[in-house]
Image (cartoon, rainbow, N blue to C red):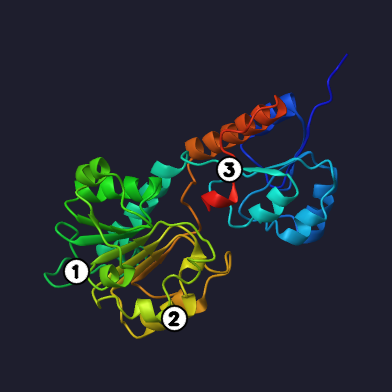
Amino acid sequence: MSVRKLKVVLTRRLPDAIETRMRELFDAELNLTDKPMDQEMLAAALQRADVLVPTITDRIDAELINGAGDQLKMIANFGAGVDHIDVEAAVARRIIVSNTPGVLTEDTADICMSLILSVSRRIVEGANVVTEGQFKGWTPTWMCGRKLYGKRLGIVGMGRIGQALARRAKAFGMQVHYHNRKPVPDMVAEELGATYWDDLDQMLARMDVISLNCPATKDTHHLLSAERLALLQPHAILINTARGELIDEEALAEAVKNRAIFGVGLDVFEHEPAVHPGLVGHPNVVLLPHLGSATIEARQDMGERVIANIMTFQNGHRPPDRVIPAML
């Protein structure tokens, strides 16, 4: 007697090997066009899915969750961040939410360090000069950026990615500082040579480079407000590879316009995929299209983590990456 396979609905196209494996294990419904689902399509998917596999492009709010069919038992997110899912509403409906932590740590830290290098050494600006045929030869005072060795890096959010960035920064001879809800264990702080600041404002005012590596929550929305951006030194560099909502982009655009900051590197945006027009076209602003986890290896690992969570649930056990409100 055959056992009914779980109905698993994927909202976006995933790596071929992952989709093939899902078809083998589940009654998987694929999104072959890879076009984001609108709210009406998501609502319909929640009426037929036992398990929904969304991505960051899907906003699964309380209204959608409360309107889901009784058969929906799990939301297995393809990604680490779950700020696009109302986890509390899901838990209230006894719907399990899982994510894929850890698998994109090193890749995101790579992008973060790449942005620090690109902005400080004006790499993108210089590459554009060559591409546009404007390179007239070397001169002693032209295209001078800022060295990283000996500079202070302030990391906001010392989780997996923050610590991975700290290791890279230490290798470049940077001094590592950080702000977090609580200090990291002494052994980690000693390994990284990291200095803890319990007061974010105090740290912001003293750093050469600021990197945002914390999750987006109600408490961190516009964490870098106009008032906090004003604390940054004129030679400071601001990097964000976490979530766009952490920065008041209107205030950041004003700071860039007034040259109140040396440079900015962003991989995420407040109203993604829209980019604030005031941030576009500045030589000291490097903008990337959300490349943090964009490696073949990371996306494959993310898909395998999703499958592992669904399989564990299907076998009657608690998924290893279950998300509960207290974790947020």
> Could you tell me the amino acid type at mark 2?
Ala
Mark 3 is surrounded, within 10 Å at the Cα level, by few (under 14), some (14 to 19) or many (20 or more) other residues, namely many
Mark 2 or mark 3, which is nearer the start of the sequence? 3
Badge 2 marks a residue whose secondary structure is helix
Pair 1/3: label in front: 3
Image location (x, y in percent) of residue 269: 51, 66
Please state if 250 lies on the left or on the right of 142 as rendered: right
Residue 35 visible somewhere in the drawing: no
Q: Residue at coordinates 18% horizontally, 72% vertically from top-left?
A: 142
Pair 2/1: label in front: 2
Q: CA distance from mark 1 to mark 3?
A: 43 Å
Give residue 251's mark.
2
Displayed quadrant of residue 232: bottom left
Badge 1 marks a residue whose secondary structure is loop
Query: Measured along the vertical axis of the image, is residue 157 above or below residue 128?
Result: above
Residue that carries the numbered disc 3 in the rendered image: 99
Please state if 69 lies on the left or on the right of 79 as rendered: right
Residue that carries the numbered disc 1 in the rendered image: 144
Q: Residue at coordinates 48% horizontally, 35% vertically from top-left?
A: 297
Give residue 91's mark.
none
Residue 59 or 325: which is nearer the viewer? 325
**Farthest residue toward the bottom?**
258
> Could you tell me the amino acid type at mark 3?
Asn
Mark 1 or mark 2, which is nearer the start of the sequence? 1
